[in-house]
Amino acid sequence: MQGKVALVTGASSGIGLAVAKKLAQRGAKVALVARGKANLEEAAREVARAGGGAEGVAVFPLDVADLTALEALPAAVVGKLGRLDVVVNNAGVNHRGAIQRHTAAKLAEVITVNLTAPVVLTRAAVPFLERGGSVVAVASIAGMVPVPGEAAYSASKAGIRAFCRAIADDLAAADVHSGVVCPGPVDTGFFGDVSEVPNLVFSQPMSSADEVADAVLRCIDERLDEVAIPAQSGRLATVAYLAPSFARRIRPMLEKRGRAAKAAYIASRARK
Ligand SMILES: NC(=O)c1ccc[n+]([C@@H]2O[C@H](COP(=O)([O-])OP(=O)(O)OC[C@H]3O[C@@H](n4cnc5c(N)ncnc54)[C@H](OP(=O)(O)O)[C@@H]3O)[C@@H](O)[C@H]2O)c1
């Protein structure tokens, strides 16, 4: 990564921050994107300490749902950091529960942030990306097998997963790699109110943001189409997607396992 420039959305916390720090540790300059300016500036200080100092980091506070601002971003990054090699489409949002609980605008936000924004940013980045570059999205196991109670989120993550796979041939013509990373549950602030998270989500082993960031770096380094983390959850999700009757049969067992894991997680958070 020495001498390369990476753009990471959702870089002020969780997976995005962990990815930015690892890229900086390996010598890349990093452009950090999120809405909250104060958190983004704090993240930039962390990334600078992890890597090549303050000159190796730039912040671009914006809402990825602002598609006009997003389209202008790759040119701004090249203007500030000199080139563009890697784009990590990581910013995401989830509004959980039955769709009737949410306004149309809230549901549309899930699709815009998780799917439309990465499509728009990838399109805008292509003319600037160096040969040997990479575009990677952070999707979800919920994009491999739909999760009840997270319908719009599952749809957005299935969509971005399909986009990353479909765009691979187009980008390969410019020697740019396209990949997608699909994590199961990850211990970040993304859960929000944990009681709202479906038990099914907790039926899979929890990863750390650092472990997912390692998967993102591996996806880039090895130019992989897709990485599921944990790998076993990816295999189970694929089988469950292909065989809905099998998925229905194992669901009570997974719900039971998830209920216990969720209670243990809530208890461990209360102790912290
Ligand atoms: N945690 C999990 O269990 C899990 C599992 C599978 C997949 N994922 C995916 O992993 C990705 C990262 O999630 P995380 O767990 O690291 O969550 P997180 O810790 O809550 O971080 C989310 C990041 O995205 C930024 N963000 C959110 N909405 C944005 C917007 N509209 N425009 C620009 N930035 C925005 C946030 O900053 P601001 O709020 O300041 O904008 C923050 O930097 C998401 O795409 C999520 O769907 C997470």
Image (cartoon, helix red, strand yellow):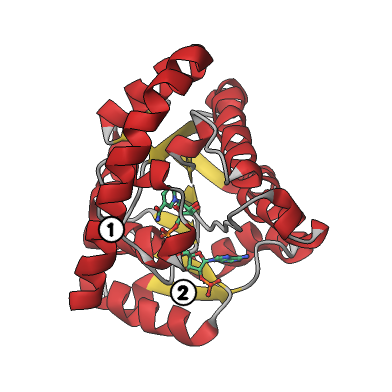
Image: 38 above or below 114:
below
Q: Residue at x 58, y 55 (%)?
A: 96
Q: Distance of mark 2 from mark 1, alpha carbons?
A: 40 Å
Q: Position of residue 116 (x, y in %)?
A: 70, 47
Q: Nearer the viewer, residue 34 or 23?
A: 34
- Crowding at mark 1 (Cα within 10 Å: few <14, some 14-19, many 20+): some
- Please give the residue where the numbered disc 2 appears in the rendered image: 58
Q: Residue at x 52, y 34 (%)?
A: 143
- Please give the residue where the numbered disc 1 appears in the rendered image: 263
Location of the C terminus by quadrant is bottom left
Q: Nearer the viewer, residue 16 or 100?
A: 100
Q: Position of residue 58 (x, y in %)?
A: 46, 74
SS at badge 1: helix
Farthest right residue in view: 104
Q: Is residue 47 visible?
A: yes
**Callout 1, which amino acid?**
Ala
Asked whether, in this view, residue 4 is left or right of residue 37, the answer is: left
Q: Position of residue 32 (x, y in %)?
A: 47, 68
Query: Quarter of the image holding residue 237?
Result: top left
SS at badge 2: strand
**Callout 2, which amino acid?**
Ala
- Crowding at mark 2 (Cα within 10 Å: few <14, some 14-19, many 20+): many
Q: Nearer the viewer, residue 96 or 139?
A: 96
Cβ at disc 1 under 8 Å from ligand 1 = no
Query: Quarter of the image holding residue 78?
Result: bottom right
Image: 7 above or below 140:
below
Q: Nearer the viewer, residue 17 or 262?
A: 262
Q: Residue at x 46, y 67 (%)?
A: 192
Q: Position of residue 36 (x, y in %)?
A: 54, 80
